[in-house]
Amino acid sequence: MSDLGCIIGGVESINPFWLASAPPSDKKYNVERAFKAGWGGAVWKTLGVDPPVVNVTGRYGVHRTQDRRIIGINNIELISDRPLDVNLREMEEMRREWPDRVIIGSIMAPMDEQAWKSLAIKVANSGVQGIELNLGCPHGMCERGMGSAVGQDPEFVEQTTRWVREVVDIPVFTKLTPNVTDIIVPAAAAKAGGAHAVSLINTVNSVIGIDLDTMAPTPTVDGRGTHGGYCGEAVKPIALHMTAEIARQPETQGLEISAIGGITTWRDAAEFIALGAGAVQVCTAAMLYGFRIVEDMNEGLGAFMRDKGFRSIADFKGKAMAQTVDWNELNINHDLKARIDDEACIECGRCFIACEDTAHQAIRIDAKTDGGRKFTVIDDECVGCNLCMHVCPVKGCITMEAVDTDRPYLTWPEHPKNPLRKVAE
Amino acid sequence: MKHFKLTTDNSRLSSRDIAENFDDLHPALDGAQAIVEAARCIYCYDAPCMNACPTRIDIPKFIHQIRSGNLDGSAQTILSENIMGGACARACPTEVLCEEVCVVHHTEGAPVKIGELQRHAVDHIMMKGGSHPFSRAPLSGCKLAVIGAGPAGLSFAHRAAMLGHDVVVFEAKPEAGGLNEYGLAGYKMANDFAQAEVEFLLAIGGINIEHGKVLDDNLLLDDLRGAYDAVFIGAGLATARGLGVDGENLAGVGDALEFIENIRVAADKSSVQVGDDVVVIGGGNTAIDAAVQAKCLGACNVTLVYRRGPDAMTATQWERDLATANGVVVHYWASPEAFSGGAKVERAVFSAMRIDDGKLTPSGDSFELPADMVLKAIGQTLNSDIFGEMKLDGGKIAVDAQYQTSLPGVYAGGDCVKSGEDLTVQAVEDGKQAAIAADIMLRAKLKGAAE
Ligand SMILES: Cc1cc2nc3c(=O)[nH]c(=O)nc-3n(C[C@H](O)[C@H](O)[C@H](O)COP(=O)(O)OP(=O)(O)OC[C@H]3O[C@@H](n4cnc5c(N)ncnc54)[C@H](O)[C@@H]3O)c2cc1C
Ligand SMILES: Cc1cc2nc3c(=O)[nH]c(=O)nc-3n(C[C@H](O)[C@H](O)[C@H](O)COP(=O)(O)O)c2cc1C
Ligand code: SF4
Ligand code: SF4
Ligand code: SF4
C-alpha cells in the first residue's frame, strides 16, 4: 500500500490535498462537507481585523475554451466577510470534531505589528495546526495596503512573517503572490523571516474579459469592472515554474512548499510534488466541480505511486528537480526530426499548414493514388520544433525522433558559435 | 435516427401523429449544441469535406465562424457558394458527400454534423430577417430568361442578379422551388421551408417569376432567344417512366412522384389517401421517400421491391436504414410482372430475378404480394421533345464545360443535364457556374460592342 500521508512545514496530513484559503473553506458547513469527501485539510478563508469587509455582487468571471469548458476563474472577492469570532468558533469546533484533519488559519492585516500579532494570537488560540499569511490578494485588499501590496515588498514579507513567528509556536506558512518579477525575492524574504513553508501561488492579476455589448470588464458591477485574481487550470504553468525556482535556487533551497495553482487532478498534484512541493492546495477545481473531485485525486495518486513503486509522497518529492535546469545546460547537439505515421494520419493537413505558415516549410503534401494526401517531413528543413506534433489531432501520429546518436553533449557556453564560449581547461 | 409513429394493424394514425411524422427529420441544434458540435471540427487545411461538397462551401471556415460567435459571417460563407444552403443542409445526403470524408470519422467514429451546423447558421440569418446578405453589382442592362424555378433555375437567377443582370424566370407550376417544393420528402422541408427560402433568395431583387409559363406550350425557346441576352434551362426531368406490364392502368397503381407531390401540397397531411398494403417499386431515393412517407401516413405494410441486389441500389445506406428502422420491408431481386384486382389493384405479381452472364434475367420463380396501392419509382426522363434541335447526351441536354448547350447563348443545368448526381446541391452548383459563365460571355459581348 502506498501511503498518501505527508508532513508539510511540520504539519502532518493524511493526504497532500488541502483546500486553499477561498470560498470552499469559508465556513464550517463547507469544510465539513470537504472533510467528508476526503480532503486532508483546509486553509480557512482569510480572516482580517473586524469589522469584516463588505463584498460586491458580480464577483467571478471565467475564461472558457472554444468548447465552453472553463479553464480559469477571475474573482474580485475580498477576504472573509463574516465576523472574526464566528470564524474562530467554527474553526475550533472543526479541530475538535475532525482531529485527523488539518485546519490552517489564514490571516491578513494592515502593515502594523500589533494588528498582525494580535490577529495571529487569536487564530492560534482556536487550536489550528498552522497559520498562513495571505500576502497575495491582488485586488481590493491591495488598494488598502494589504494583500499583494505587502507581498510585493520583500521587506514587508520578511517583517510580517517575523512578527507572526514571534507570537505563535505553530508552523507559519507565508503565502506568496505571483505578481512579482522574480519569485525568489519574496520567497527568500519569507525564509529570512522564519517561515516554515511558503504557499504559492495566490491569484494572478488579470482582466478576464470585456463585455462587448456593455464595453465593461467582466465580472461587471453595476456597469463597471475592475482587475481581479486569475486562477484555475490556466495558471498551473506559472505556478509550476515558481515552485521549481524556489525548490532549486540556492537562496531558497530547503524552504518547504505548499503548492497551489490550477491543480485539478492527481496528475497535476504529482507534477508539483515532483518539482519539490510537499503538499498541494486546491481552490478552483473544487469551485467548478465540488468536493468530490478529491476522491480521484486520492485514488489516482495512490495508483500512480503503486505503479511507479513509490511508497510515500516523500519518495518522489523533488524527483524532477535534477532534470529542471537553466537553458544554458541543455544539449544543443540533441537533434529531433518529426516523423509522421502514415497509418495513423487522417489527412487533416493541420501539420502542413502550421509548419508552412509559421515554422520551417518542412512538410510536403503528395497526392496518393487513392485520391488522398500523403504528408512527409523534409528532414533537411525540419528544425525539430515539435509544432506539428502538437497540432496533430491524432495522438501519437507525429513523433519526434532523435537523430543525433553519435554527437557529444554540448551546451551553449561550450558551443563554437558562442562568442563568449568557455574553453575547457 | 427519427422513429416515426407507425401502425401495424388497420387502425389509422391520428392527424396529430401524422403531422408529427412530417415534422423535421433532424430537429434543429440549439446555440449551445451548435457550439459543442462546432468544436469537434479540427479546422482541416484544404479540407476533404470542402472538396466533397459539389458547391465547395468553405466548411472549416463556416464552422469556425459558428464557434467564434460570428453566425452572420458563417451564413455568408455558406450562402456565397450555395444560395440554397438551407435546403441543402436539410436534403443533402451528407453521408455520401461532405460527412463521408470528414476526418473526425477516424478519430471519433462519427463525422462532424456538417449539415446540421450549416442549417444552424443559415436558419439564423433567414430567421433574423433584415436586409439580404448580398448586394447586386452595377446593373449591366442585360436581360436573362430562365426556364424552371427549381434549384438550378433559382441558383442561376440569384447569381445572375448578383452579377448585375435582370432575370425573368418562367415556371410551369403555381409555386417556385421545383422539387424542393414538390418532390423532397415532407419531413426534410418541414414548416414550408422551400417557400421561405425562395422568398429569401428573391430578396436580392432583379428577379421576376412568371408562373404558368410552360416551354413548348405557351412559351417558345426561339422567342426567348430573340428577346433575351441569354437563356438558362433548369427544367429538371419530367416524364415518369412506365413499367409496361399488365394492370398498370388499374386504379391504385400510380407514380411515386405524384404521391409525394400530393403529400407536399396538402396543408393537412392526413387528408392524403394511402393504402394499407403499399408496394413501392424502385431502388432510388424516390422509392425510399415514397415508402417512408407511406408509413408516415399510416400504411400498415409497406414493401419496397427492387429488381437488383443491395449493392446496385442508388438510395444511400442512411436512407435505407431510415426506411427499415421505420418498418419498410425491402425485397431485392424481384421485378413486377403484372398487377391484378377488380375495380382497384389488389395484388402485385413479381418474378424473381438473378444475374445470368452479367445480365439481369428472370429466374423462373414468381410470387405475389397483396397490394391496394402500388407506387412506381423507377426514374424520370427528360421530355426531350420540347427542346427542339438541341443536342442531347445520354438522354439529357448536352452542355460544355461552361454549361452552354449546342445553341449559343442557351445554358442548362440541374437534373436536365449530366453534370453529377441528380441532387439539389448539384443543381445549385450548376446554376451558379452557368450564371458565372453567362456573365463572362455577356461582359465580353458588351465590351466588344463598346469598342
Ligand atoms: C422524390 C425525390 C426526392 C428527392 N430527394 C432528394 C434529397 O433528399 N436530396 C437531394 O439532394 N436531392 C433529392 N432529389 C433530387 C433533387 O430534387 C433534384 O436533383 C433537384 O431538384 C434538381 O433541380 P432542378 O432545378 O434541376 O430541377 P427541378 O427541381 O425538377 O425543377 C425544375 C423546375 O422546372 C419546371 N419546369 C419543368 N418543365 C418546364 C417547362 N417545360 N416549362 C416551364 N417550367 C418547367 C418545374 O415545374 C420545376 O419547377 C430528389 C428527387 C426526387 C424526385
Ligand atoms: C473566489 C476566490 C477567493 C479567494 N480568496 C482567497 C483568500 O481569501 N485568501 C487567500 O489566501 N487566497 C484566496 N484565493 C486564492 C486561492 O486560495 C488560490 O491561491 C488560487 O485560487 C490558486 O489556486 P487554484 O488555481 O486551485 O484556484 C481566492 C481564490 C478565489 C477564486
Ligand atoms: S518539427 Fe517543426 S520544423 Fe519540423 S516538421 Fe514539425 S513543425 Fe516543421
Ligand atoms: S496533423 Fe496529423 S493527422 Fe493531420 S495530416 Fe498531419 S500527420 Fe496527418
Ligand atoms: S473534414 Fe471534418 S474536421 Fe475537417 S474541416 Fe471538414 S468538418 Fe471539420
Image: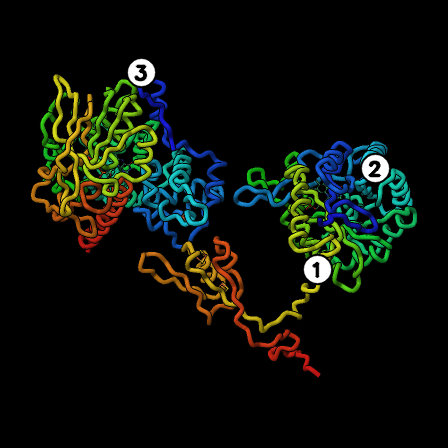
Chain letter of mark 3 equals B
Q: Which of B394/A75 is in front? A: B394
Kind of element beneath mark 3 = loop
The x, y position of residue A355, in whole percent, is 47, 62
> Label 1 is placed on what type of residue?
Lys
Residue holding disc 1: A319
Chain letter of mark 2 equals A
Kind of element beneath mark 2 = helix
Q: Is residue B83 left or right of residue A33?
A: left
What is the quadrant of residue B254 in the picture? Answer: top left
Residue holding disc 3: B11
The x, y position of residue A320, in whole percent, is 68, 60
Badge 2 density bin: few <14, some 14–19, many ≥20, Cα 10 Å: some
Q: CA distance from mark 2 to mark 1?
A: 33 Å
Look at the image and tell me in which quarter the N terminus of chain B lies: top left
The x, y position of residue B54, in whole percent, is 30, 47
Q: Is residue B180 left or right of residue B220?
A: right
Q: Quadrant of ligand 2?
A: top right
